[in-house]
Each structure stands twice: as structure tokens, then as C-alpha cells.
Image (cartoon, rainbow, N blue to C red):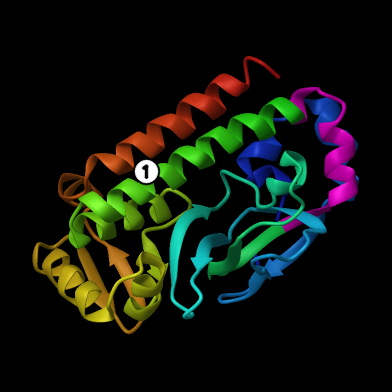
């Protein structure tokens, strides 16, 4: 039996003052987000914003030859569809569910109505956008400057931050696709982490046994992203 769902499982929605939350709550529609579902394709016109609660969505850039690489992840800390209020209405990224779960969708017109009030929703969305830009920038630097093992540790830790447990349902092939590397490289890096006793991997399931151990193997990028999200969204409550 599925656990009860609430929009306030999404940290952005939970941060809204009561008046703003009560205004949009009736317009939020609970949706399932199954593994591998494409929420929107690159270049498509967005008709909804999405607030994940228990799902995690990967934002990926798709190359002309079909190769792709993750530029950011969005879970219960965020929202999909920032191009709506930035004025673009479409995006060059593809959003695909990397961890199955649920979320809430909000029609674009209702999001823009609330955003254009120039109140708490606008300030919260802009702060989240800055945090997301930090994640994208740090991902680009990490992919260029740091080892694959460090990248894998960063990705595992960011994913854990969005989950209620230490269990990840994810194949090495999918992780390789998101990091834009060969599967063999992920197999080798995951093998090192397993030998160190930090994770256990079996048939598409990763169990993190020693989170502190992963933190010793990751690069500075994880802490930078985590600190910036914490600063912006914690401070946001003081400005709403």
C-alpha cells in the first residue's frame, strides 16, 4: 500500500507562507512518476511545472548523436519548469525520471499567476533557480576536473539527500548514461567503493553502507552544492 502523499513533502511548497500555499494547494495535481518516464523533451513547450515529492528527475542535455549527460537532478528540494517564469516557455534539456515516485503538477497559468503577484512565490522560485544554476555549474566543473570515482560519490550523495533511505534502485548502465561515461568506468569505480565497504551493489540495487566513507572519497563539488542549496532556501524563509 502506497504511503500517503502531501504537497508539503516538497520543500519549496512547504516553505510557502500559509496564505500562498492555501491559494495554490487546490490546483496541485498528484501524479505518479515511474522510472524512465520523460517528463518533457528538449525543445517542447512546457504546460506544467512539476514539484517532485518522492521521485527524482534527471535533467539531461541530449547531443545530436543521441548521447546524453546529466547537468542537474531535481528531487523534493525543487521544481521542474523554471523556464516558465524566466520567459522561455521551453528548454534545451530533457527531464527523465531516475528514481520512481510521485510529485505534483501545476498548470503553467496558475504558476505564472502566483509568480506575477511578485510575492513569496516569486522570491522562492528565483532563489531556487540560483541554487539550480550552482548545481549545473558545479556539475560541469566536476565532470571536467575530477575523477570518475569522485563524480560517482558526488552523484550518490546528492541522490541520497533526496531519499528517505540508503537504498537506490539504479543500474550501472543508467548511472553511466547520466554521467556521460562508459559503463565499464562505472563498474570499476563502484567496485572500488564496494571493496572499501562503502556500498553494496547487486542487480540494479545500490545500498550505501557508509555515507561518511563516501564523503571522504568525493570532491569539493558535493559540499559546494549542498551548502548553496541550504543557504538560499534556508534564507528564503526570512524573505517570504
User: x%, y% of residue 186?
Assistant: 24, 73
What's the residue at 48%, 53% (across, down)? 72
> Given the current orientation, which residue lies at the most extreme bottom position?
203
Quadrant into which the C terminus falls:
top right
User: How many marks overall?
Assistant: 1
65, 208: nearer the viewer: 65
Asked which quadrant contains residue 37, the reply is bottom right
**Relative horizontal placement of residue 131, taking residue 106 as reference (left or right):** left
Asked which secondary structure carries label 1, the reply is: helix
> Given the current orientation, which residue lies at the most extreme front position?
64
Q: Examine the rendering and report whether any part of residue 3 can be seen.
A: no
**Relative horizontal placement of residue 46, taking residue 130 as reference (left or right):** right
**Relative horizontal placement of residue 160, taking residue 103 as reference (left or right):** left
Membership of 111 in magenta stretch: yes
What's the residue at 83%, 29% (across, down)? 20
Quadrant into which the N terminus falls:
bottom right
What's the residue at 15%, 74% (across, down)? 188
> Given the current orientation, which residue lies at the most extreme top position?
238
Question: Magenta segment range?
Answer: 104-121
Q: Which residue in the protein does label 1 denote? A: 138
What's the residue at 48%, 51% (across, down)? 162
Q: Examine the rendering and report whether any part of residue 151 can be seen.
A: yes
Local crowd size for mark 1, using a 10 Å CA cut-off: few (<14), some (14–19), many (≥20):
some
Asked which quadrant contains residue 87, the reply is top right
User: x%, y% of residue 98?
Assistant: 51, 68
User: x%, y% of residue 150?
Assistant: 21, 54
Up the image or down, 87 lies above or below 201; here it is: above
65, 220: nearer the viewer: 65
User: x%, y% of residue 51?
Assistant: 68, 51
Asked which quadrant contains residue 173, the reply is bottom left
Membership of 161 in magenta stretch: no
Up the image or down, 84 lies above or below 117; here it is: below
Amino acid at each position: 500500500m502506497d504511503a500517503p502523499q502531501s504537497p508539503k513533502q516538497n520543500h519549496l511548497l512547504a516553505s510557502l507562507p500559509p496564505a500562498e500555499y492555501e491559494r495554490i494547494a487546490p490546483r496541485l495535481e498528484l501524479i505518479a512518476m515511474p522510472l524512465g518516464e520523460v517528463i518533457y523533451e528538449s525543445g517542447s513547450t512546457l504546460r506544467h511545472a512539476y514539484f517532485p515529492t518522492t521521485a527524482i528527475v534527471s535533467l539531461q542535455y541530449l547531443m545530436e548523436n543521441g548521447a546524453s549527460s546529466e547537468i542537474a537532478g531535481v528531487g523534493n528540494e525543487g521544481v521542474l519548469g523554471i523556464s516558465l517564469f524566466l520567459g522561455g516557455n521551453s528548454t534545451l534539456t530533457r527531464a527523465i525520471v531516475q528514481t520512481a515516485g510521485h510529485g505534483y503538477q501545476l498548470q503553467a497559468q496558475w504558476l505564472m499567476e502566483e509568480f506575477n503577484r511578485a510575492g513569496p512565490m516569486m522570491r522562492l522560485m528565483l532563489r531556487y533557480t540560483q541554487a539550480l544554476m550552482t548545481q549545473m555549474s558545479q556539475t560541469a566543473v566536476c565532470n571536467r576536473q575530477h575523477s570518475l570515482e569522485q563524480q560517482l560519490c558526488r552523484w550518490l550523495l546528492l541522490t541520497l539527500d533526496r531519499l528517505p533511505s540508503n537504498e537506490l534502485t539504479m543500474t550501472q548502465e543508467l548511472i553511466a548514461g547520466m554521467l556521460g561515461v562508459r559503463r565499464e568506468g562505472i563498474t570499476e569505480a563502484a567496485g572500488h567503493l564496494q571493496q572499501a565497504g562503502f556500498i553494496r551493489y547487486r542487480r540494479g540495487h545500490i545500498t550505501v553502507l557508509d555515507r561518511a566513507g563516501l564523503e571522504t572519497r568525493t570532491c569539493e563539488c558535493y559540499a559546494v552544492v549542498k551548502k548553496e542549496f541550504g543557504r538560499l532556501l534556508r534564507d528564503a524563509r526570512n524573505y517570504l
